[in-house]
Amino acid sequence: MKTASLLGVLALLCISAAPLAAQQAPDAGSVASRARGVDRIDGVTTAIGPRYHAEIHADRVVYIPALGSAAESTSPWTASAATIAREGGAEVALSGGVVQFSEQRADVHFAGGASASYETRADGLEQSFTLAERPHGDGDLVVRQRIDTAWPLLSVDAATGVEWGSPDRGGVRVGAVTAIDARGATIAGSLAFADGILEYRVPAAFVDAAAFPLLVDPLIGSQFFVGGDTGNSLFDVQPKISYDASNGLYLVVWKRVMSAQSTQVYAIRINSSGQFLGAPIHVSQGSAAEIGEALDVANCNAVNAWVVAWVREFSYLPLGTALGLTFRAIPAFPTPIQPGPLYSLTGATQAYFAVALSNQRGTGMFDNTLIAAYAQGGVLIPSQITGRRLDVFNDMSIAFGNDVTLHVYDDSTDSIEEIALSRSGGAYARYLMAFTIKSIASGDRDIRVRVVDEDLSVQTGAFAIAESSALDERDPTVDGNGAEWFVAWEQSSLGSSDSSIYARRVNYTGAMKIDPAHVISAVAGVAEADPAIGYTGETWMLAWSKPNTSTTDDVLVAALNEVTVTSCGPPMTISNATLDLRAPGLATKYASGVSSDDGLVVFEGTTGGFAATDIYGQALETENGLASDIGGGCGLFSGQANAGCTVSSLTSLPLSLRNAVSGVPAFLFLSVNDLGFSEGGCTLHADPFSGFLIAAGNTNALGEKDYSLPLSPTPTLVGLQFYSQWGTYLGAIGSFTIGGTPTGLNLSTAVLARFQ
């Protein structure tokens, strides 16, 4: 796997990454803490920064600090009804405001030439007032605003600022006043607050001598800033990601914890070079609480849009509250963004606990279609998995199909905790749904899968992927191409704090076939967690978190052979000496219909003790060689040859046979030349006369055989082509003959591969 730089100009992490496929990982970059800007969402000019959410209206600004989960609650702070006057002169109200905005700034232009500006910063929202002409009067210049907030007043200091809030959870602060005239002359002003009126005061002598226009309160380009208390935690969590092929953009979605009682959902568009496109997008609307782990995003490339789904708490008086689902379509283009309306699934006697989305299928009639799967049931415990078809349209509206029951279980003994859907339905428009069932009595969790199609017709029963009364299997992730899938999960012994990453390959072509479980990573005494999978069309790209030898957690990313599930080299390690890196989310371009092995992984970066959490990202590209199926097989049960991870840095090359006859001798043909000898409907491409014929042993009960060819790592292998093909010995019923003489062999399809 080779890596490409993400967010290069925004890189904050100093990553020490192990080489993967002879390439070095670059620095990862911060997403959430650097994502700030202004946009008009739902008709409201909205300013978003890492510690706040603000709404800018013609007559007021509403500022809500994000204080993290340590704060019991947060509240809005509203400044409105600004007036300007000199003492001894008439007070002039700032009225008739017109709001304009750019990516980082909003300006409110008032009648008479005055204006207010609001610029997004990492530490707060800078507010400033500009006066085009000298006001009448001879005293101090005074700008007044009425403040409305539930925050109690903490302190007033004329020189340094005014604070509202709580000493133990933060709040809102207005900083010191400065004035700058047109010549660049500056002077410190003062603040006062009484009876709900906040005053910003500039000395009379400076106003008399000033060259206009005069800027009041700039702080590095704009003066007084309104900011959340920096003593509390930034807490951005649960990153998810999806790719839009037509515009070449990823959408990163995450939750921001405003307080212990409220979170909001935000998103940012990022191109493959790591540059942000536009301002952050406020996906959730208003200040309603957003609760739960369930958050997902998927792409509908046919209409250049993403759909975001999340769990939300709804009120049903006098019954209390219940958890429901909210969906919203986000366009990939243009800028500024105009998201679609909010759609909710909810009910006073129902609850929705988990949700997963697929990408569009990519072919066929219903290219604007996604599917959603979610747990639904009584208010306390869900009792079934339900699916709905979502048709997404160019105006960002969503049409919901009828509820379809995908799985039913006994809610008196079990509950559903997690659901995952494969991203691409492929040419077959089929998806694999993986889900976790938890025993209420023992706490044991198991993982099962079912195949569904785009019309939500269930194709199979519920098959156990990981099920043991002595083990706790959880957190499934899945991807695939509509016929073959890869399921990974986290596994531990009951009661143990250690955990490992396991995976299984699943195939469905009319009948279900599940490979044995593979150990991806297992280290005694180590808690490995949070697997996330993406399919590149050639390899499985798997990310997970793992503690390192110091005091922090790393994110590891491995490229795995799509057939043998062996690693195409050592995993890439993304590490930081001061951050715990956890909860990766992963998207590949292939899942959105692009013939590419690129991907992007996003993850949480947390300082010790969950003091602060940001979202980071890293661009990835698998480097696994090239391989194409060139046919030549003898038909039914002759098998398919596979060559994966043809990388010049490896010490062995995995070659495999699948879907052949079970329990028979298998022979591997290898050559750099194409023999091209055809007989009886078969073609032998790999030339044993100029190459190799290897007796590899018998196929297993599934008709499979693997062979590891020793290699001497060298750059001279790069570009070398070779042919690989298998023969299975069937005795007298063999199909392939040479010169009319039966060989007793069935020939598999052949592979033409090239080293990278």
Image (cartoon, grey):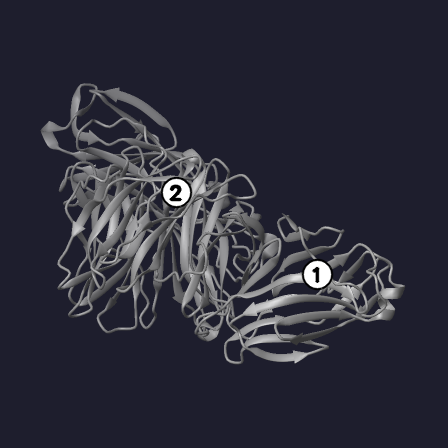
Question: Is residue 624 visible in this depiction of the protein?
Answer: no
**Depth order, front residue of 439/703:** 439
**Depth order, front residue of 422/480:** 422
The relative height of residue 344 versus residue 582 in the rendered view (above or below) is above
Q: How far is disc 1 from disc 2 in space, using C-alphas?
A: 49 Å
* Label 2: which secondary element: loop
Mark in the foreground, 1 or 2 = 1
* Label 1: which secondary element: strand
Q: Amino acid at mark 1?
A: Ser
Residue receiving disc 2:
536
Q: Where residue 569 sits in the image (x, y, percent)?
A: 41, 52
The relative height of residue 182 versus residue 102 in the rendered view (above or below) is below
Q: Residue extending furthest right? A: 209
Q: Amino acid at mark 2?
A: Thr
**Depth order, front residue of 725/377:** 377
Q: Residues within 10 Å of mark 2 (few under 14, many from 20)?
A: many
Question: Is residue 310 visible in this depiction of the protein?
Answer: yes
Q: Are marks 1 and 2 in contact (CB under 8 Å)?
A: no
Q: Residue at x 20, y 39 (%)?
A: 457
In the picture provided, is 407 more to the left or to the right than 202? left
Residue receiving disc 1:
128
